[in-house]
Image (tube, rainbow, N blue to C red):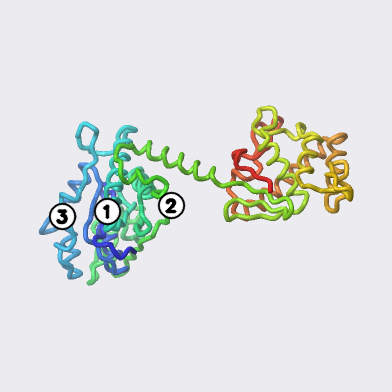
């Protein structure tokens, strides 16, 4: 965690089950020994009313009971009506619930804006809980954390043992230091007494990809909607991905992308180089480098073979007609014969080789766009590399 952190905020989405807030507070403060300075909740009108009644009532509220049980000064945790954000329509009306497509869009925009604003303060750490509210609220909060979360921010989901889940035991809000007996109803409707001593509360950390480094203006500009932010992030990811050059080292028979490297046997490296050549030269019927196996010609094989710079004793470059003279490249003679006389055998040969190549490259961590892809129906299948032709380099 940054040494400059001065405030830790628990950020929750909540609906009609405020229990998840005190359960998360318990896990953070009592099980992990972490400090929580402020609780912020994003909810609807009905959720706000439930929070005020169940948690924030000065006499019967479970937040104050929690603080008394664990000798915490209630004033040390800022949590009141001012830290509750009601989801609203663009014209200012509060949402009683989130059901329509429009209401979901309003919620997404506001959740993103809240996280963006909090993330602008480098002295504040966000611990976001995706345990409450409508499922879409949890999804939007998770996405917002991906867009704006910093290295020291956290995302979690609180897990409760079955007997003490809200549906079974609505009176359970946390595990008190002195055990209490509560009523718990099982799925068949049977009611029995359970002791809070048996309750288990687990805080499951949710790893998430932090995309904030892709665009610094995300943290400065609040004009983007949720949908626009997602599209913008995807565009930047696509751009970032396109910057990685595909390098084919013909001497070492090694394929490299950034820090990922894969060395292939001669046949597999040659077939991969064939599809890289087709893509780079924008060949094929659509000019996209994707071809059917029946479209691969002797000239294509020869062009790739000449890239390997095999030379005869007189210093002249060898063409594919001399492939049998080069150790480990005798397979090209078989390909040429199949090309002329046995297309089904050629098809099966190339399919099997493609499968081997893709398995090996995937095992080395190369993304899918660097594997030999296929498009079209079975009888019209074409094969090629999705990577940009401008980023293919033979060396």
Residue at the (20%, 42%) spot, across then down: 45
- Number of labelled discs? 3
Nearer to us: label 2 or label 3 = 2
Residue of label 2: 209
Sequence-wise, which precedes: disc 1 or disc 2? 1
Task: Please tell me how crowded label 1 is: few (under 14), some (14-19), or many (20+) other residues with Cα within 10 Å.
Answer: few
Mark 1 or 2: the one toward you? 1
Is disc 3 placed on a helix, strand or loop?
Answer: loop
Residue 22 marker: none
- Judging from the image, what secondary structure is the residue with disc 2 in? loop
Q: Residues within 10 Å of mark 2 (few under 14, many from 20)?
A: few
The one nearer the camera, 188 or 349, is 349
Instruction: Determine which of the numbered discs, if any, sits on residue 121 in the image.
Output: 1
For mark 3, does the 10 Å Cα neighbourhood hold few (<14), some (14 to 19), or many (20 or more) residues?
A: some
| Residue 105 in picture, x, y percent from top left | 33, 36
Q: CA distance from mark 2 to mark 3?
A: 34 Å
**Depth order, front residue of 130/249:** 249
Q: Looking at the image, which residue is at 58% across and 48% down?
A: 367
Q: CA distance from mark 1 to mark 2?
A: 20 Å
Please give the name of the residue rendered at 40% of the width and 40% of the height, measured from the top-left corner: 230
Judging from the image, what secondary structure is the residue with disc 1 in?
loop
For marks 3 and 1, give the one nearer the viewer.
1
Q: Which quadrant holds residue 161?
A: bottom left
Identify residue for label 3.
56
């Amino acid at each position: 965690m940054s040494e400059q952190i001065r405030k830790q905020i628990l950020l929750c989405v909540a609906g009609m089950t405020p229990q998840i807030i005190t359960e998360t507070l318990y896990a953070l403060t009592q099980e992990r020994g972490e400090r929580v300075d402020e609780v912020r909740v994003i909810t609807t009108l009905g959720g706000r009313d439930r929070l005020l009644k169940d948690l924030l009532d000065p006499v019967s509220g479970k937040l104050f009971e929690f603080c008394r049980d664990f000798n915490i000064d209630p004033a040390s945790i800022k949590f009141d009506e001012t830290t509750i954000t009601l989801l609203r329509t663009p014209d200012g009306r509060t949402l009683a619930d989130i059901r329509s497509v429009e209401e979901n869009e309003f919620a997404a925009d506001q959740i993103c804006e809240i996280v963006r604003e909090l993330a602008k303060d480098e002295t504040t750490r966000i611990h976001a809980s995706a345990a409450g509210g409508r499922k879409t609220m949890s999804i939007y909060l998770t996405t917002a954390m991906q867009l704006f979360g910093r290295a020291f921010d956290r995302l979690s989901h609180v897990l409760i043992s079955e007997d003490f889940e809200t549906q079974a035991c609505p009176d359970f809000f946390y595990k008190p230091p002195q055990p209490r007996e509560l009523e718990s109803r099982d799925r068949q409707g049977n009611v029995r007494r359970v002791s809070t001593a048996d309750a288990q509360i687990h805080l499951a950390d949710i790893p998430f990809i932090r995309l904030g480094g892709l665009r610094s203006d995300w943290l400065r500009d609040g004009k983007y909607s949720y949908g626009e932010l997602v599209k913008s992030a995807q565009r930047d990811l696509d751009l970032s991905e396109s910057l990685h050059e595909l390098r084919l080292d013909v001497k070492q028979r090694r394929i490299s992308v950034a820090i990922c490297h894969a060395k292939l046997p001669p046949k597999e490296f040659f077939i991969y180089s064939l599809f890289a050549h087709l893509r780079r030269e924008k060949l094929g019927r659509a000019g996209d480098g994707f071809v059917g196996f029946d479209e691969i010609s002797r000239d294509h094989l020869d062009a790739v073979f000449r890239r390997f710079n095999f030379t005869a004793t007189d210093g002249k470059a060898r063409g594919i007609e001399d492939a049998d003279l080069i150790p480990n490249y005798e397979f090209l003679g078989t390909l040429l014969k199949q090309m002329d006389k046995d297309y089904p055998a050629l098809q099966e040969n190339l399919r099997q080789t493609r499968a081997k190549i893709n398995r090996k490259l995937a095992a080395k961590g190369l993304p899918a766009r660097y594997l030999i892809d296929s498009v079209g129906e079975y009888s019209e299948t074409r094969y090629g590399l999705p990577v940009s032709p401008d980023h293919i380099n033979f060396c």
